[in-house]
Image (cartoon, helix red, strand yellow):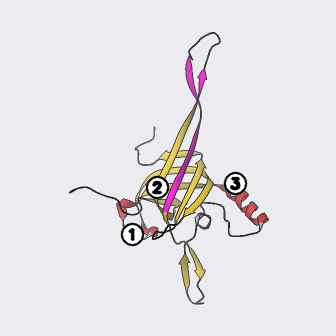
Amino acid sequence: MAGQRTINGANALIKIADKVIGYATGISVNEVYMLNRIDILGQMDSIDIEPIGRTVSGSISFMRMTNNAAINNGDNDALSLTGGGAGFTGLAPNTSSDNFNIRTKSVVDFMNDGFDLEIVDSGTEAGLAPDNVQGKSRYKIKGCRTSSQSFSLSRGSIMGVNVTFEALQLIETDGGEAI
């Protein structure tokens, strides 16, 4: 079919604190408005519906986490970059220790701090290194806490990292002026 356009690879960059942590192929964010009906005793129908809260949750399927930590690769003169999972990039609590006290403290500290995510359209500046990408910001998600992480690996593919989260606010950054 002539003229049909397809997308190959990642369609968004994920940032924490202005640092690209990965390329995502699947992002789903839900903003839910909690409502309460106002009823009067003896009347069949509600007289009003009032907003009482708002929650934000979502999931991200990463195609690739970026290289973001320098380690000594055995050559004393050279440092190499290594990737890592969600814990290594700051998207989930660090699970690199097998000591249960350290792992518990890591989770508690991580949940106290939380993090902010920024979703950036990577299609606007395709081919640039992650630190140089100046793509258009689409959404900011404030006060995130990771609720789960998983990874998948299948023959002939790159290992994918999947993260679900709860958040405090969803801000649409390319929707024009706020009211």
Crowd tier of the residue under label 1, counting other residues whose Cα lies within 10 Å: few below 14, some 14–19, many 20 or above: few
The residues tagged by marks 3 and 1 sit, at their Cα atoms, a distance apart of 34 Å
Residue linked to disc 1: 128
Q: Which mark is residue 45?
A: none
Q: Name the mark nearer the viewer: 3 or 2.
A: 2
Residue under the point 55% across and 20% down: 48
Q: Is residue 43 magenta?
A: yes
The stretch in magenta equals: 35-62
Crowd tier of the residue under label 3, counting other residues whose Cα lies within 10 Å: few below 14, some 14–19, many 20 or above: few
x and y percentages locating residue 171 in the rendered image = 50, 46
Residue under the point 56% across and 15% down: 45
- Image quarter hosting the N terminus: bottom left
x and y percentages locating residue 163 in the rendered image = 57, 57
Q: Which mark is residue 112?
A: 3
Q: Which mark is residue 26?
A: 2
Q: In this rendered view, identify the residue nearer to me: 97 or 134.
A: 97
Taken as a whole, is the magenta stretch helix, strand or loop? strand
The residues tagged by marks 1 and 2 sit, at their Cα atoms, a distance apart of 21 Å
Please report whichever mark, 3 or 1, sits nearer to the chain's N-terminal start.
3
Q: Are marks 3 and 2 in contact (CB under 8 Å)?
A: no
Please report whichever mark, 1 or 2, sits nearer to the chain's N-terminal start.
2
Q: In this rendered view, identify the residue nearer to me: 80 or 171.
A: 80
Looking at the image, is 124 positioned above or below residue 128?
A: above
Q: Amino acid at mark 1?
A: Leu
Q: Amino acid at mark 3?
A: Asn
x and y percentages locating residue 164 in the rendered image = 57, 53
